[in-house]
Image (tube, rainbow, N blue to C red):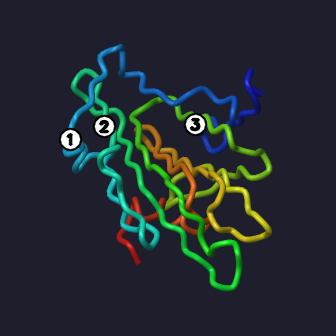
Amino acid sequence: MGASGWWAEINGILVGPGAPPTHSERCNYDAEYVDAAETEGTELEIDPAYLPEGATETSQLAEVVACGGVVVWNLRYYVVPDVPDPDNPLPLRSGGGFNISRVLTGTRSFSFYSAAADRTEPVTISGRPAVFMRPFVANERDIGFFEGALVIAEPWGMTAIYGTGLTTEEFIKVAEGLYREAN
């Protein structure tokens, strides 16, 4: 248990509200923003083969950080529209926003304040160990209304998908789409 809430190590990743924040050990106050093109062809490139219908990247919010001339952080933001249900006041999918980040780090840690121990579980994404902090399901309908996170352990660090607007199935499909062609 961390000082500010529970945390646990699952699949080699520290997760929960009390987990230490993510950082790259390569940075010693020499961080600078660089062009996203510097991640192309590297393990930090973010090019998902699957995005939910209508999802768009908000490229003006992309953050790519280098320390000592080495790219250590790539963060992309996406917006997801509502999908209305004509037969129900709750939509088929709630709109929202999510991000995908990749960080070069030796300490895999993801501090997620909305995580609940009963919705946090080990999973495997394309053969990689991961942790899924499932979004809360409202009225037994998985519509992506509440925050969720999926954190994947990588040999060089970690990949995280975090936010709202994704159903449980869509979190998994976005994650798997980072490692193979869309179906």
Left or right of residue 166: residue 156 = left
Image position, residue 34 (x, y; %) = 23, 34
- Kind of residue at badge 3: Phe
Q: How far is mark 3 from mark 1, CA to CA?
A: 24 Å
Residue 12 at x, y percent in the picture: 60, 39
Instruction: Specify which label sits upstream in the sequence, 2 or 1.
Output: 1
Residue 83 in picture, x, y percent from top left: 55, 74
Q: Quadrant of residue 170?
A: bottom right
On residue 14, the disc is: none
Q: Residue at x 44, y 58 (%)?
A: 79
Disc 3 crowd, CA 10 A, few/some/many (<14, 14-19, 20+)? many
Mark 1, Cα crowd under 10 Å, few <14 / some 14-19 / many 20+, is some
Circle 1 sits on which residue? 38
| Mark number displayed over residue 64 | 2
Which marked residue is nearer to the observer: mark 3 or mark 2? 2
- Type of amino acid at the residue the image marks with label 1: Glu
List the residue tagged with mark 3.
110
Task: Locate the C terminus and report the quarter of the image it occupies.
Answer: bottom left
- Which residue lies at the image location 32% right of the left edge and 58% below the top edge? 47
In the picture, the quarter occupied by the N terminus is: top right
Cα gap from disc 2 to disc 1, whole angstroms = 8 Å
CB-based contact (under 8 Å), mark 2 and mark 1: yes
Residue in front for this viewpoint, 90 or 142: 90
Element type at mark 1 = helix
Asked if 173 appears above or below 115 in the picture, the reply is: below
Q: Earlier in the sequence, mark 3 or mark 1?
A: 1
Above-or-below relation of 13 to 138: above
Residue type at mark 2: give it: Val
